[in-house]
Image: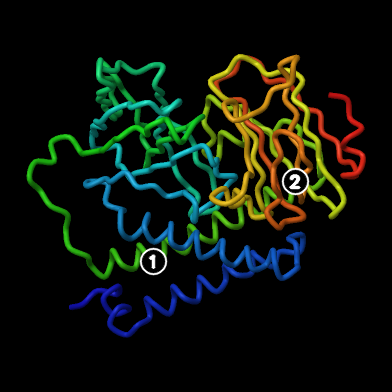
Amino acid sequence: MISEAEKKVLDGTVWDEFCDALKEAGRIVQSKKAPGDAFNQAEGYRYLTRLLRGGLESFLEFRDPAFPHLRCGAHETIKLGADNPDNRYESATINPKYDYRITGNRCTVDYLGISSIINKYASGGTMEVTGHIDHRQMEIGPDGELEIILSKTEKSGNWLPLGEASNSITVRQTFQDRINEKRAELKIERIDAGDTRPEPLTAEKLERGLLGAVMFVKGSAQMFENWAESFLPTLNDLPPADQDYCQSIGGDPNIFYFHSAWQLAPDEVMVIDAPQIPECQTWNFQLDNWWMESLDYRHHTIHVNKHTAHYRDDGSVRVVISHIDPGVPNWIETAGHDMGTMCWRWIGADEHPLLNVRVMKLADLASLEE
């Protein structure tokens, strides 16, 4: 007797249900408070295709926790949740009934952090951190070699705790200087896997994978659409975000976040002054679109960090956002956008100074005191 999943594969129902559920995700792009012009709507639909690519890889291609693989799921053309242009993100599916080993080389990337998490993005939920370790806590060999054990029970040496419900790990590599820093080279394996091999694809695995992918698209898109809408009351300001919420959806525990929305007329600029730069691992600012995707950092200067910034004589930093080059340091390009969201991060800082934000006419920018 064939199973229900096999029947759905044989008569095509499994594909029809996937396509119907994906069609529903398109309604998120047309949310009432989302920008309704063709440009932002086009970016919204492209955003859904990017989430779908990430979802299919995560839920269909790399879903087996017995044979985990570190994959880069957010990059130049898959973006979500104010993805950091200074970061390389990697993730792997795990199951806490197993123990795992991460091996590789630390190399020279400025920051390396690894978290075990409970990822509920596919249900529009949270991404709770259940354990964390970064390079400052790791024992690293003289040539950069490292080994980390992932398990529910504590181990000697480098140990990343797994919770009872942990289902994934996230690796963050944060660069200050992408040209000269070398990313960590890491791999993950299940301990005592022996010479076993993954089972072949089944109808049940296909059905679960397609359903998981489309739920990821809908859950992620709705969550970040709601978050973008919540920034509207602080439009063109940049206050501290709700740090507990940031952590609940996967934020790095070493980061203090500022989030908001922005909108500029063609003749306007935004000036962000950071009067005090605290001692920190690094810091950065980035400009995002309405869907909380970082703008195109391959071809535009849409972010600045501790290494790339121009500092004023008193050690402070001024960032200027404008549609055209204003001829001042730390210019952030809008890359064809007139509205969106934005994020400032203090990373590894004991203090979290506030930021001063103002919008003015481009013609008045030259009158500001240096």
User: In the figure, is residue 86 to the left or right of 365?
Assistant: left
Report which quarter residue 172 is drawn in.
Answer: top left
Give the colouring mode of the picture: rainbow
Q: Say which amino acid is labelled 2.
A: Asp
Q: Identify the residue position indicated by label 1 in the image.
A: 210
Looking at the image, residue 112 sits to the left or right of residue 27; the answer is left
Task: Look at 89% across and 30% down and name the residue there.
Answer: 368
- The answer for how far apart the CA atoms under marks 2 and 1 are is 45 Å
- What is the x, y in percent for residue 294? 60, 48
Q: Earlier in the sequence, mark 2 or mark 1?
A: 1
Instruction: Single out the residue that lies furthest toward the front.
Output: 327
Give the label, 2 or 1, closer to the camera.
Answer: 2
Q: Which residue occupies the extreme bottom position in the image? A: 11
Q: Residues within 10 Å of mark 1 (few under 14, many from 20)?
A: many
Q: Is residue 241 left or right of residue 361?
A: left
Q: Quadrant of residue 5?
A: bottom left
Depth check: 2 or 123 in front? Answer: 123
The picture places residue 222, in percent across and down from the top left corner, at 61, 57
Task: Decide if residue 96 is on the left or right side of residue 118.
Answer: left
Q: Which mark is residue 325?
A: 2
Q: Are marks 2 and 1 in contact (CB under 8 Å)?
A: no
Amino acid under disc 1: Leu
The secondary element bearing badge 2 is classed as: loop
What residue is shown at x 71% (from left), y 58% (from top)?
336
- Quadrant, the N terminus: bottom left
Q: Image point 86% across, 47% down: which residue?
A: 268
